[in-house]
Amino acid sequence: MRVPHRPRSSRSPLRLGGAAALGLAAATLTGSFVAAPATAATSATAATSVNAATSAVGGTPGFTAIRDSMRPTTDKVTGAFTAKQMTVEVALSPRDEAGLNSELSAVYTKGSARYHDFLAKGQFDNLYAPSATTTTAVTSYLASHGLTVAKTSSPFLLSASGSSAQITSTFRTAISAYQGRRGIRYFANSRPAYVPTSLGGAISGVVGLNNTVRLHSLSVRPSGEKPRTASSCETGYPTSQQLFDLYVANTGVSLGYGEGPGCSGLTPSQTNSIYGAPAASARTQGGGVTTALFELSAYNSSDAGTWARQFYGPKYSPRVTEKNVDGGPLSTSCPPGDTCTADYSGDIEVDADIEQEMSVAPDASITVYDAPNDETGQTSLDEYTVIANDDTAATVSSSWGLCESDAGEGYAESENTIFEQMALQGQSVFAAAGDNGAFDCIATDGSQSAAIDDPGAQPWVISAGGTSLGTDNPGTAAHPRYPAPGVETVWNPDNLCGTAAASASNDEQGGYYWCESTGSGGGGSSEFWGAPGWQRGAGTASKYTTYGPSHCTLAKGGSTPCRQVPDVSANADEFTPYAEYCTGTASDTNSTCATIGNGGGWFGIGGTSLSAPLWGALIADRDSYQGRRSGNIGSLVYADPGKYLNDIAAPARSPETGVTPATSNGLFPTTAGYDEATGLGSPKFAAVIGG
C-alpha cells in the first residue's frame, strides 16, 4: 500500500490587506588572518569598536541594515579575515509573507475549510517564491560589485562569490577573525550587513559571513563502559558514585540494559512494547510511507543489514536508499571560503538514525540524504532544500543541530522558509532538542547561559526531547510494559546536570560539568522565534515563559510568548539505551565507530538524536494507518496531550533505591502538563497511530 499525498488543486494563496563562540576541534580556515596588535585592550574594546563602526555605516543614506545581521560577542578579535575567494548565499524573503502566514494558519487550524489541504510538489515556489523582478534586482546589485551570482536549488537563495573585499564592500560590513574562550578560531562579520533600502524588504539575510554554523550529531554513549554478558542484562541504574568513577576517575563500569546482543540496549520489540504499539501489521509499521533522514557524515551502509537480520531475520531487507547532496559526505568540493568535513566522524549517528527508524517503522522506505558537513551552513540549507523540493518523504528527522546563537538569525530565517514549505506540503519534521540540558551552548563555548538548539527551535519543526526509563530495566523480557507512573523521568542521570556549585554531591565538579559529561535533555526558550499558533494551552504559560521581542527577536509584539522546546520526548538516556550496530575500519577516516572496542559492533546508544527518528518513524506509522500525511503534529498533540502522550510529571521516590529520580533538565523542572524539560511527554504509540 502506498500512502497518497492528496495534493490540492492549483489556486491562488490566501491574501491579507550570530554568532558567538565555538567549541569544535580547531579547523583550518580557507582564507588568511591579519593579526591584530596584541594589547590587553583588544578584547575589551571590541564591542565599543563595533558600535562605532555600526553607527558610522548606519548613517549612509540609501542603505538599510539587515535585521540582526551581526551577533555581538566578547570573544577576542585576532585580526581581519581576508580570502581571495569566498561564497555567501543571499536569502530572499517569500513573496506575500502575510498570505503565507495566513495559509499556514488555515492548513493547521482544525475546522478550517483548508485544514490539512496540503500543497502539491512545486506549488510552494509557484505561490511564494520571490518575483522575477525582485530576483533580477538583487542579482544586478550583487553583480554590480563584481560578484559572480548563480542560482541554487532554491529560488529563495542566491549564491554570490568573490573576494572577501568584494563581499564586505557589497554589504558594507567587515569580517574579523576571532578566538573563542576554548581556543577555537572562527570568522564573523564584525558589523551589520547593509543593502540598498530599495532591496531591504527583499533580502532577509546573508549566509556565509561567518563560519560558526557547525552542526554536530546529538547522540551519546558512556565512555569506558564495560558491557555485561547476556546473563547480566538487568544491572541497576548507575549510582552517582559509579558515574564519578566512570567520568572523573576514568574507571570502567560494567553496565547491561535490554535484550540487545551483549545486553547492549533495547530491541525493536522492547521499544514498541514499552510505548504501547498496536498489533503489528503493514498499516501500523509504516507500509507505503517514505521517511527522510538528514545526515552529514559517511557511514557503512552494510551495518543496517546486520542490525536488521538480528531482529527481523534473514528474509528482511532494509528499505534504505541514499541520496547525496552537494557531492555527498565525502566530497572534497566545498563553497569557496568554507570548510567541509569529509569523513566518517558521524557514522555512529547515521547508523543510529536508520536503525531507530527501522525499529518503529520497519515497513517504511527510508531515504538517507547526506551532504558534506560545512561550517557556514550552506550545505545544510542545500540538503533541506532538496528534501523539501523532492517532497517524497512524509516525515523528516534531523539528529544534527547547533547552539541557536551560533546559527545566527540569517541562517535561522533561511531554514524557516524551507520548513514552512515542508509544513504546507504536509511533511512532518522532527529535530533533536539537544543533549546538554538547558545549556546547549556549553559544549561549544562553555557558556552557562540558558540556550537551546537549532533547528529544534524552529516554529515549524517538532522538537524531540529526552526522557529516561530509569530503574525500569526490562532485561531479556521481549514484551515489557510501560513502567509505573513516575519511573520514566527527564533524562538527567542522577540529577547531576544543573547549576550547583562544586561539592561532594557532584564529586567536586559542579553541575555544569555533568551537563557536558553525562548529558541531559535539551529544553528552554528560543532567542529568535515567537511561539507558533499551535503551541498554546497544556501548561505552556508558566513562570518560565519569556516574551518577545525583548527575549525572542522575531516575535510579533510584546505579548507573544517565545517558542518553547521540547514539544515531545522519548527515552534518550545512554544508561537506558537502544541497541546499535555500527562498525568502522582504519580506512574510514575519523570513524567514531572504529574507536569503539575492536572496530565497533554492538553497543548502547542514547541522546535526543534517538528521540527525533523515533518520532519520525512513529508518524510514518500513523500516516500509513490513516492513509494520508499528518504534516506538522503540533496542533494535534497540544490540543489533547493526555490522549497521545505520557505526562512526565515530578517523579516519586523510587521504591527500589529510595532515591528521587531526575526532576529537571538542569534548570527547568518537570511538572504536570507542559514543561521545558520534557515538553508534553513521551508517546503512546497506539493512540498516536490510530487517533
Image (tube, rainbow, N blue to C red):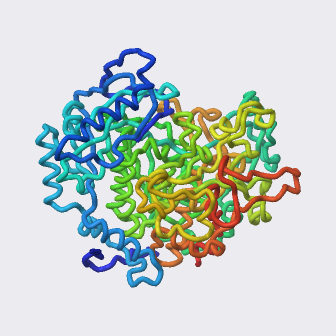
Answer above or below: position of 48 versus 581.
Answer: above
- Residue 425, quarter of the rendered image: bottom left
**Which quadrant, please, contains the C terminus?**
bottom right
Q: Position of residue 3 (x, y in %)?
A: 44, 74
Residue depicted at 88% across the width and 57% down the height: 655
Residue depicted at 13% across the width and 59% down the height: 133
Q: Position of residue 113 (x, y in %)?
A: 39, 84
Q: Position of residue 577 (x, y in %)?
A: 68, 50
The answer to whether any part of residue 115 appears in the image is: yes
Between 355 and 47, the one lying in front of the other is: 47
Q: Is residue 291 left or right of residue 164?
A: right
The number of callouts visible is 0
Between 631 and 681, the one lying in front of the other is: 681
- Residue 683, quarter of the rendered image: bottom right
Answer above or below: position of 83 versus 626.
Answer: above
The answer to whether any part of residue 315 appears in the image is: no
Answer above or below: position of 457 versus 105.
Answer: above
Residue depicted at 12% across the width and 48% down the height: 140
Q: Is residue 165 left or right of residue 29?
A: left
Q: Is residue 37 left or right of residue 13?
A: right
Between 461 and 510, the one lying in front of the other is: 510
Q: Is residue 131 left or right of residue 628?
A: left
Q: Position of residue 633 (x, y in %)?
A: 51, 69
